Structure formats: structure tokens, C-alpha cells
Image (cartoon, coloured by chain):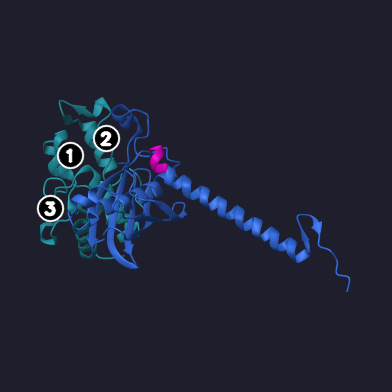
Chain colours: A cyan, B blue
């Protein structure tokens, strides 16, 4: 099992390949969309590369969940409800929702997709 | 002009690999503009040919039901140019395939030398949304484009039939019978 740092370095190079960004731009706190300019199609590219680079199998809907906001009980006035946040925690146990929970605006969900989130996701898959 | 940037499949292994040929001729209008007096195949059209080869390879796996679109080219490197009169060979290997999309490694060769090395990423359009926008017709795999694969299949079948016929003939000759008529026996 590789160390946390080794996984981080590999995630970093994966994102350099997928997004064409410079290595120094990819820090643990970088958000994929806001900071690194990822578009929706890039998420699938990242999934393919993570599978290849780490030898893991990534099911559909991971690590970027799909259709989280279809249930009206989970969203109210453009924000995640308590139930919605619980659902997010269940579907993204590898993401740190602390900051997001303070202002769970649906528009901010992209802020959860950070380099660090990917590192935690890959670690959880390798440990399984 | 027909938007078909491959002439023929030379090899097609379902879900794995495809090899296609593209002949460059001065009958192609674009070569007269790119560039006047120096007809060079535009790199973008080489990528299009590689993408058509790869797109058919990807689409064939699902029986051409999915709408496969070129979504992204993460990497494209060119090592030379191809001019009118040249023959390009496109080799495409399917490296990843899942419900949402696929990735291929695509290479173009000129006289055996690597001319272009490209990674191409395809997305499967969500059928519900795609039908709303484009209608139920599969605009990606037109009959004209699929005709290239159909032609290769027809040629393979014809070759197989010829080989079978030749094998039968040689077998018959070995038995001394042609078309069911015994060869006359030697009197000696």
C-alpha cells in the first residue's frame, strides 16, 4: 500500500495529464473546476486515468456522485437540507464536508471536488 | 465533399484494434488551399481520420446504438507532414471502454514511420438528452461512414470465399477430379 504522499504525487501527475495544467498548480486544496479548470467531460477522463494509474476499479457515480439533487427533500431554496447533507456524506465518505455544511449551497458542490478529496478516495479504494 | 476521412479498413478486431488507410490525392479541394503549391494534409484532418477509425471501433462494440462523440483530445503529437500522393495508415487501439465513454490510442504512419501520436477521448451521449437535442437518428454513424466498415466486411467475405474456392479446387486437383469429372486415366 503506497503512502499518502505517494498517492498524492500520483494523483497530481494524473491531473497534469488529464487537465494539461502545470504540476505546481496542483496543490492539495486546489478545486478541480474552480482552480484547475476541469469541465464535466474531464471528470470521466480523470476516472479512466485513476483506474489505469492506480490499478483500481471505479464504479459509476464515484468519486463524483451523479443525480444527488433529484429528491426534493434533499434540497430547499437552492441549499442541501440536513437529509441532503446526510445523503452526500453517505455517497462521499472520502470528502470533507465540514466547510461545505456551513453554507451548503448547491452551486458550491464543485468546491468539494478537490485534489485532497481524490487522494482520500484513492486511499480508500486501495485499502479496501 | 463527403465527411469521410478514411478510405478503407485493413484490419478490424472488434473491441480491440482497427487499422485503416487514407490516400491523399490532389482531387481533395482542401489540399489546394493548404497550402497553395505545397499540398499538406492538415493535422486536424489526420486527427479526424483517426477519430473516425476510433469512433467506429468504439461504436461497433455497442452495435452502433450509442451516439459516440469526440469529446476531448488530451494529447496530439506530430512528427512530420503528409503530402498529396502519400498514403497514411491509421492504427487505433481501444484502451478504455465503459458505459459513459471510451479512450483510444491512435497513431498515424507514413511509409512505416510514426507521423502522429494522438490520444482521443469519446463520450457516449446520454440517449434521452441527445434525442431531445438531435432527434432519434444517429447523426454520428451515418450510412456513408458505416459504409467504410461494410465495404471491409464485404471484401473480407469475398476473399474468404475465393480462398475456400481455391482450396476446394486444389483438393479436387489432388484427387484427380475437376468439377466432378474424373481425369482420364493414363493408358500406360
Q: Residue at x 34, y 45 (%)?
A: B4
Mark 3 highlights which residue?
Answer: A29
| Lateral position of residue B182 relative to residue B65, left or right | right
A101 relative to B6, above or below = above
Quadrant placement of the N terminus of chain B: top left
Q: Are marks 2 and 1 on the same chain?
A: yes
**Is A19 in the magenta?**
no
Q: 10 Å neighbourhood of mark 3: few (<14), some, or many (≥20)? A: some
Residue B115: % across, % down: 28, 63
The outermost residue toward the bottom is B188
Range shown magenta: B142-146
| Lateral position of residue A44 relative to residue B62, left or right | left
- Circle nearer the N terminus (1, 3): 3
SS for tag 1? helix
Which corner quadrant of the image does residue B118 belong to?
Answer: bottom left
User: Disc 2, disc 1: CB below 8 Å?
Assistant: yes
Q: 10 Å neighbourhood of mark 2: few (<14), some, or many (≥20)? A: some
Please give the label number shown on residue A109: 1
Q: Residue at x 34, y 39 (%)?
A: B140
Amino acid at each position: 500500500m503506497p503512502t499518502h504522499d505517494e498517492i498524492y504525487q500520483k494523483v497530481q501527475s494524473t491531473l497534469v495529464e488529464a487537465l494539461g495544467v502545470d504540476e505546481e498548480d496542483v496543490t492539495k486544496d486546489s478545486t478541480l473546476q474552480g482552480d484547475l479548470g476541469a469541465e464535466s467531460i474531464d471528470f470521466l477522463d480523470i476516472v479512466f486515468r485513476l483506474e489505469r494509474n492506480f490499478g483500481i476499479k471505479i464504479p459509476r457515480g464515484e468519486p463524483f456522485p451523479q443525480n444527488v439533487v433529484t429528491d426534493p427533500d434533499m434540497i430547499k431554496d437552492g441549499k442541501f437540507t440536513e437529509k441532503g447533507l446526510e445523503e452526500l456524506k453517505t455517497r462521499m465518505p472520502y470528502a470533507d464536508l465540514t466547510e461545505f455544511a456551513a453554507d451548503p449551497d448547491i452551486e458550491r458542490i464543485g468546491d468539494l471536488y478537490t485534489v485532497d478529496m481524490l487522494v482520500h478516495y484513492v486511499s480508500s479504494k486501495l485499502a479496501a | 465533399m463527403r465527411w469521410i476521412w478514411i478510405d478503407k479498413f485493413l484490419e478490424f478486431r472488434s473491441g480491440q484494434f482497427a487499422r485503416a488507410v487514407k490516400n491523399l490525392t490532389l482531387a481533395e479541394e482542401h489540399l489546394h488551399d493548404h497550402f497553395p503549391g505545397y499540398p499538406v494534409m492538415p493535422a486536424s484532418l489526420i486527427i479526424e481520420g483517426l477519430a473516425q477509425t476510433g469512433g467506429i471501433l468504439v461504436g461497433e462494440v455497442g452495435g452502433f446504438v450509442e451516439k459516440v462523440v469526440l469529446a476531448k483530445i488530451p494529447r496530439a503529437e506530430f512528427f512530420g507532414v503528409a503530402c498529396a500522393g502519400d498514403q497514411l495508415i491509421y492504427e487505433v487501439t481501444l484502451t478504455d471502454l465503459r458505459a459513459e465513454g471510451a479512450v483510444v490510442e491512435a497513431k498515424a504512419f507514413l511509409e512505416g514511420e510514426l507521423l502522429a501520436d494522438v490520444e482521443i477521448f469519446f463520450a457516449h451521449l446520454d440517449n434521452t438528452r441527445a434525442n431531445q437535442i438531435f432527434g432519434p437518428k444517429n447523426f454520428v454513424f451515418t450510412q456513408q461512414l458505416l459504409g467504410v466498415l461494410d465495404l471491409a466486411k464485404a471484401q473480407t467475405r469475398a476473399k474468404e470465399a475465393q480462398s475456400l474456392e481455391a482450396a476446394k479446387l486444389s483438393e479436387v486437383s489432388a484427387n484427380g477430379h475437376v468439377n466432378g469429372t474424373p481425369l482420364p486415366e493414363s493408358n500406360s
